[in-house]
Image: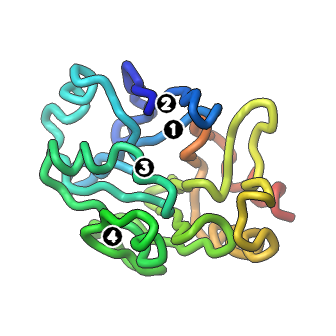
Amino acid sequence: MACAEAFQTIREDLFFWQAYDPSVKVDLSCCARGTKQGLVFIDPIPLAREALDQLAAGRRPVAIVLTNGNHLRAARDFRDRFQIPICAHRNAASDLGEVDRTLEDGEAFADEFTVVELPGASSGEIALHNAGVIHVGDALIHLPPMGFAILPDKYCSDPMQLRRSLEKLLSFPFDTLTFAHGLPMMTQARQRLSHLIS
């Protein structure tokens, strides 16, 4: 799997890195959030050791969250290095085979994130909401040349159900979206999502 050489600080508590994976011919993106409990990795891909050391310096890693059954990525390496659990929706657990803790729709994870189940995309698809940011996995993408888009139908278990599921995100206040494939959307994310699914 491709390895990112560096991470970007998007805001004080949000860190992002990305690398192109030639085996699947797409950018793999991920992020980490600083919380009161510590650092939560979301769908992590490999990050160069020096950069990962810098990211973790002064921030205690506490968990890994995978947003669907396709995103094992570098989670095992992060778990082994930091001795932290891999967490995912129960419907993703059988595909991942590596889950230490299952998550449920509406759960308050790490006392700061709300887990939002998004059926219709990949197995066990979830989003996480926290402090004006929503983190999505494959349900939404932000890649050239398509730009901001819903996961293409051919990759969905039920495209119409996914559209209905995405409406749930509009009940949360947010202006930033992060993706498992694509750069973060830092402004007017809620308005753009509303327009996309209307």
Residue at 52% x, 67% y: name it: 126
Question: Which one is earlier in the sequence, the residue at label 1 or at label 2?
Answer: 2
Question: Which one is earlier in the sequence, the residue at label 1 or at label 3?
Answer: 1
Judging by the rendered image, the residue that carries numbered circle 2 is 18
Mark whose residue sits in front, 4 or 2: 2
Q: Residue 53: x and y, percent?
A: 19, 28
Q: Do the residues labelled 4 and 2 touch (CB within 8 Å)?
A: no
Question: Which one is earlier in the sequence, the residue at label 4 or at label 1?
Answer: 1
67 over 73 or under it: above or below: below
From this viewpoint, which residue is outermost toward the right?
198
Which image quadrant: the C terminus? bottom right
| Neighbourhood count class around disc 4 (C-alpha, 10 Å): few under 14, some 14–19, many 20 upward | some
What is the total number of numbered labels drawn onto the structure image? 4
Question: Which mark, by number, is residue 109?
Answer: 4
Please name whichever residue, 70 or 191, is drawn nearer the observer in this view of the structure.
70
Q: Residue 81: x and y, percent?
A: 15, 42
Question: Which one is earlier in the sequence, the residue at label 2 or at label 3?
Answer: 2
Q: Quadrant of residue 102?
A: bottom left
Amino acid type at circle 2 is Gln
Q: Residue 55: x and y, percent?
A: 25, 31
Mark whose residue sits in front, 4 or 3: 3
Q: Residue 194: x and y, percent?
A: 78, 60
Judging by the rendered image, the residue that carries numbered circle 3 is 43
CA–CA distance in space, label 4 to label 2: 24 Å
Left or right placement of residue 3 versus residue 137 in this view = left
Residue at 61% x, 65% y: name it: 122
Q: Are marks 1 and 3 in contact (CB under 8 Å)?
A: yes
Amino acid type at circle 3 is Asp
Q: Do the residues labelled 1 and 2 touch (CB within 8 Å)?
A: yes
